[in-house]
Image (tube, rainbow, N blue to C red):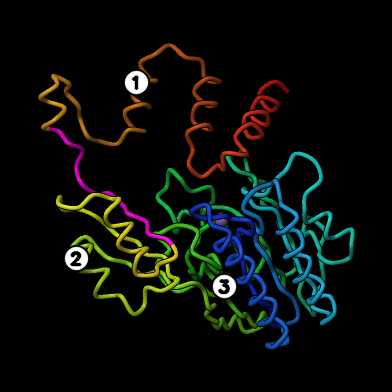
Amino acid sequence: MTRILHTADTHLGCRQYGLEERREDFSKAFWQIVDMAISEKVDAVVHAGDLFDERYVSAEDLRDVLQGLFRLKEAEIPFLAIVGNHEQRRGVQWIDLFAGLGLAVHLGPEPFSLGEFAFYGMDYAGRRELRLPKLKEKKSALVLHQMLDKAQPMQEAELKSIDMANVGASLVLLGDYHEHRVWHEGDVMITYPGSSERWALSESSPRGISLIHLESQRLDRRELQTRPFVFIRENEDPIKGIDAHAKELRESVVAVYLEEEGYTIREIEEHGLSKGALAVRVRDLRRPDLAQAEAQGVSFEVGNLDQKIAERLDRENFSEWTRQIDSIVRDERIADSRVDDEVSRYLEKVLE
Ligand SMILES: [Mn+2]
């Protein structure tokens, strides 16, 4: 019996809300994963990309990840990984550096044997055409960092789940989508483990990892202990809501969804912080002040801004290159630090 720990989207180095405490939280989640791998005596940790939040890694984050990888090495648990969109570099990848130190395996087109299973991996390929392998071994696993059509609406998906059935692997272990999901396509199990810390406020459900028996495809979840987030929804009065949650508020991140007029964002933030919250995030769902704009003789339409920009660009006589570059720049899924790389890659491809 071979059992692995499947994780992805650790986003080490994410200094969320500009707080050192949050950077440390992302490292602590990684250490918990290492502890679980050791206590569960798994045969390998499979990391499906976005170990780091950015391709520029601080000494603190490098120290934190090495501390975890050395512990896995001592426990003789291999760390099998691929490169995600957030950490991808043009030259040497971080995972290659760890592989060079004997602390990790960068999965690729050559199989890595684990028990009777062969592991293959493909780094994040973005918009480029993904050449999926045809694997001969039924007992094999393919590790990818891509958005599947079942996880996101078609226009944002890069991969069709139906195509996963033809790869030949019995397991497709994914990263990129931050929620845990499992699907079956014929005999193939396709799964995302979800992120290990809350990277966005939309990630409200508990974070965790998956333990997977390769032979039986049995999947068990283990929850991670992460910093508490308190959500105050738009049907609650924000100040009363904060008071009602006062007991859970200390050191937590408070997310307030604001729909009603009556309080300023600053008042809500200060009230939450005075009750001991680590951070207060206010999602302003109020409509822009149309009345005021009208009074100034400005007319504006509320709608999907990206859609409007795309429609306007269509009317302009721009080249296909310009349009493609524009879409890369405005793609929210491409980290800011990666935009120049993605544009260069695109240009290299079309100039070939
Ligand atoms: Mn991610």
Along the viewing direction, whichever of 277 and 195 lies nearer the viewer: 277
Q: Is residue 46 visible?
A: yes
Q: Residue at x 78, y 55 (%)?
A: 109
**Residue 139: x %, y % from top left:** 72, 73
* Whether label 1 touches label 2, CB < 8 Å: no
Range covered by the magenta-colored residues:
279-290
Q: Is residue 155 above or below residue 210?
A: above
The residue under label 1 is 312
Q: Is residue 298 above or below residue 29?
A: above
Q: Secondary structure at mark 1?
A: helix
The residue under label 3 is 187
**Residue 191: x %, y % from top left:** 55, 68
Q: Residue at x 80, y 80 (%)?
A: 115
The quadrant holding residue 9 is bottom right
The residue under label 2 is 236
Camera-near label (1 vs 2) is 2
